[in-house]
């Protein structure tokens, strides 16, 4: 499989740019499509791969721009063999993986520590309540802990754990896609 005509949306994102570079190195022609031109990245590819790489600015959330991207590609390369979709919203919660992982881990750790401290306080107050060594105010506090505060923290922990698992699944899926693209292209060339 040599010199396939490929369009990559989200071409200046992490995955899109890596995919473009790999495909260009393997001798394919690539249209880089993104909402914004990253001139530094584009020029680096253009110098190395000359006429095998072109940029087309487009917002693929608008059908008219998709049509223009297709027309541009057909005019330039006469056909489209492969479309690789790597575009995602820039305000996506997954745009900065390392930062997001650290935020979630820190948040989960802080909440788990707070929950442990509250549960220790609850246990301490429970034993003192049984021995009648605690004031009425502390008894009310104990009841609030049981009914509202601890369940609220437990729910937040569960929500954050779910968000973290979703984030990790997305990250792993994107890495798997990159790996499959590379393997598939290597296999078809043999």
Image (cartoon, grey):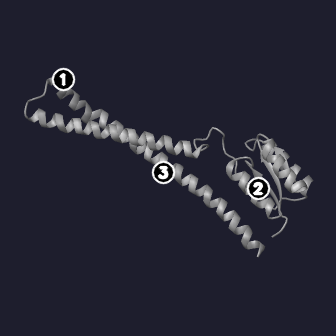
From mark 1 to mark 3, how far is it between C-alphas? 40 Å
The one nearer the camera, 10 or 82, is 10
Measured as percent of width and height from the top left, residue 185 is found at 74, 67
Of 85 and 126, nearer the camera is 126
Number of the label disc, if any, that sits on residue 96: none
Choose the circle earlier in sequence order: 1 or 3. Answer: 1
Callouts 1 and 3 close, C-beta under 8 Å: no
- The Cα–Cα distance between marks 3 and 2, rounded to whole angstroms, is 29 Å
Q: Nearer the viewer, mark 2 or mark 1?
A: 2
Q: Residues within 10 Å of mark 3 (few under 14, many from 20)?
A: few
Mark 3, residue position: 165
For residue 137, the mark is 1
Image coordinates for residue 49, horizontal then vertical, percent: 86, 56
Lower position in the chain sequence, tag 3 or tag 2: 2
Task: Give coordinates of residue 94: x percent, y percent.
Answer: 59, 44
Residue neighbourhood size for the residue with mark 1, other residues' Cα within 10 Å, grouped as few (<14), some (14–19), many (≥20): few
Q: CA distance from mark 2 to mark 1?
A: 65 Å
Residue 85 seen by the camera: no
Q: Residue at x 70, y 51 (%)?
A: 86
Give the numbered dot on residue 20: 2
Residue 172 lies left or right of residue 56; in this view the side is: left
Expressed as whole percent of the image width and height from the top left, the position of residue 135 reads 13, 24
| Residue shown at 73% from the left, 51% from the top | 17
């Amino acid at each position: 499989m040599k010199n396939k005509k490929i369009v990559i949306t989200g071409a200046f994102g992490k995955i899109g740019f890596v995919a473009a570079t790999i495909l260009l190195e393997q001798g394919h022609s690539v249209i880089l499509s993104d909402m914004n031109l990253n001139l530094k990245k584009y020029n680096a590819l253009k110098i190395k791969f000359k006429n095998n790489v072109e940029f087309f600015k487009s917002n693929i959330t608008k059908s008219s721009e998709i049509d223009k991207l297709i027309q541009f590609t057909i005019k330039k390369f006469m056909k489209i063999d492969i479309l690789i979709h790597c575009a995602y919203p820039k305000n996506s919660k997954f745009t900065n993986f390392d930062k997001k992982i650290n935020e979630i881990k820190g948040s989960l750790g802080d909440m788990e520590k707070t929950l442990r401290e509250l549960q220790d306080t609850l246990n301490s107050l429970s034993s003192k309540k049984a021995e009648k060594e605690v004031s009425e105010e502390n008894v009310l506090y104990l009841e609030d802990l049981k009914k509202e505060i601890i369940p609220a923290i437990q729910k937040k922990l569960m929500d954050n754990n779910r968000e973290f698992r979703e984030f990790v699944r997305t990250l792993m899926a994107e890495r798997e896609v990159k790996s499959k693209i590379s393997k598939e292209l290597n296999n078809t060339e043999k």
